[in-house]
Amino acid sequence: MSRYLKQTRYLVAVDSIIFGFDGENLKLLLIHRGLKPEKGRWSLMGGFIQPEEDLEKAADRILHELTGLKGVYLEQLYAFGNVHRDPTERTISVAYFSLIDIHQYEKQLSDEYHAEWVLLSEIPDLIFDHTEMVELAKKKLRYKAAIHPILFELLPEKFTIPQLQNLYEAVYDASFDKRNFSRKVLSTGLLVKQKEKDKGGSKKGAFYYQLDKGSYADKMQAFLNFIPNPDNLLI
Amino acid sequence: MSRYLKQTRYLVAVDSIIFGFDGENLKLLLIHRGLKPEKGRWSLMGGFIQPEEDLEKAADRILHELTGLKGVYLEQLYAFGNVHRDPTERTISVAYFSLIDIHQYEKQLSDEYHAEWVLLSEIPDLIFDHTEMVELAKKKLRYKAAIHPILFELLPEKFTIPQLQNLYEAVYDASFDKRNFSRKVLSTGLLVKQKEKDKGGSKKGAFYYQLDKGSYADKMQAFLNFIPNPDNLLI
DNA sequence: GCAAAAGTGTTATTCCTACACCCATGT
DNA sequence: ACATGGGTGTAGGAATAACACTTTTGC
């Protein structure tokens, strides 16, 4: 098997934008970079792809290394390939974003990478073009969640409608009418009401709901209309 | 400046999915591959990125080499990185898709690459994972055009409403009510009616319209609702 | 008994869809 | 005069948005 001669080869990395939700605020999982250059500065979790590893596998591995989680929501965001984005050596980075239930995050691993959840509204300076990656991921999250039911990935298996609404309000930095919101959400047929209530949020307690797995798979790609005025959202 | 040691480097390519519209059908610009392996088979236009070339620049260059056009609509589609997608040597490919006015395509260059416009409904077998790339590009085109006014990129500067409707009907393989269609399109405020008519399509002739450049830039990202039932569209 | 959050229904408006006829012109 | 495609208006139905009160229960 011949190779392509006279072509330059490059490092290829994967970087992960990991979103979480603590019930009140959206957060991002960042690490203190342990590697030169830029050692000690804030960074997205990332790594180089390995010779026998598909791109998506690499993204999965990196996510697993940092969080201990498998099977979480993972979607390719964009390939970043500017010549000098990593000043050490040219590296093409494929960014992925994930949505995880923050309560499943296993904290014991965080020592190895010095990982921390940071408020999305208070992202520190990041190395390289990672700030640009985060900005694009935020846009895409808003864009996509306006028409597809993906935000459930940020919640525990059982959640209440008020919790869900808090999440949407955090993502869009807006507030919605709760009557209209719950009517819309329930009209999708995605949610199954549970018998138990969550008594944490109020004295009365709010009923738990769970995703209907079957129709979730079906309607994942359906156009919904969760957000009243999705104008002025950007891709 | 040190380099990252012990990491493998890879070839990185760009492949272009180029859509065109001839007034009746959607087409794809394909080439006969002149390079081993797979010499002579149908392929997307592509090439390796160069050491001092940003990713998007590479996509631009490749498009220019094949079509002679500059400044056309170009959008990153997806990064394909399966280990054995190119059996010769591992190559990560970043796919871009473009929309061009087919009548601006300069045919004289086609000899060099044996380029041909192929009906979208009759795509031949393609090398590597190029078929997968084309499928994804079709999905994304449908998805995006349902909510953003991008299909204008496929038409000449001056076009008529019936031409535009033909284009939408080709993209969605459906037919729309012409009264509703023209009302929707005109209500965007994107179109400026011209004095002249196109007498090619009928005896009566249809008025030309042009994009209002200012509001086009503004509303490019706006959510529209061109397609009656955008359910069952996939990302 | 009261504070705090959950849950629910109605109305007005807007938007969308379905539908049919006349117009202008080249032959 | 007729065939061909261009252009326009209306009415019924569906979806959306705006709005306020009652319920539950822990304290």
Image (cartoon, coloured by chain):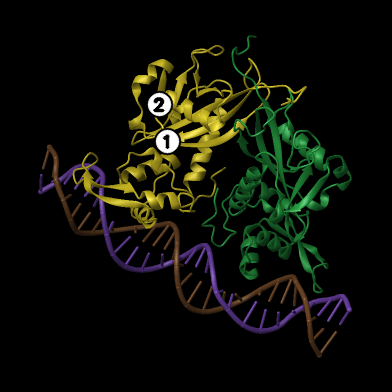
Chain colours: A yellow, B green, C purple, D brown
Task: Describe residue A213's horizontal placement relative to residue C18 as left or right.
Answer: left
- Mark-to-mark CA distance, 1 and 2: 10 Å
Residue drawn at (33%, 55%) of the image: A179
- Chain letter of the residue beneath label 2 in the structure image: A
Between B3 and A182, the one nearer to me in the picture: B3
Structural crowding at the residue carrying mark 1, measured as other residues with C-alpha within 10 Å and reported as few (<14), some (14–19) or many (≥20) = some
Q: How many marks?
A: 2
Q: Secondary structure at mark 2?
A: helix
Residue B70 image-quadrant placement = top right
SS class, disc 1: loop
Q: Is residue B208 left or right of residue A98?
A: right
| Residue located beneath label 1 in the image | A72
Are circles 1 and 2 on residues that touch, CB within 8 Å? yes
Residue B154's x, y, as percent?
Answer: 73, 52
**Chain of the residue where label 1 is placed in the rendered structure:** A
Disc number for residue B57: none
Q: Is residue A167 above or below residue A49?
A: below
| Foreground of the two, B196 or A181 | A181
On the question of residue B231 being in view, the answer is yes
Amino acid carrying label 1: it is Val
Q: Which residue corresponds to the image point at 34% horizontal and 25% vertical from the top-left?
A: A106
Q: Is residue A7 above or below residue B234?
A: above
Q: In the rendered image, is residue A226 in sight?
A: no
Give percent across and percent down for residue B203.
82, 74
Residue type (three-letter) at the residue carrying disc 2: Thr
Instruction: Locate the N terminus of chain A by quadrant.
Output: top right
Q: Dot 2 corresponds to which residue? A: A67
Q: Residue furthest front?
A: A1
The foreground one among B6 and A177 is B6
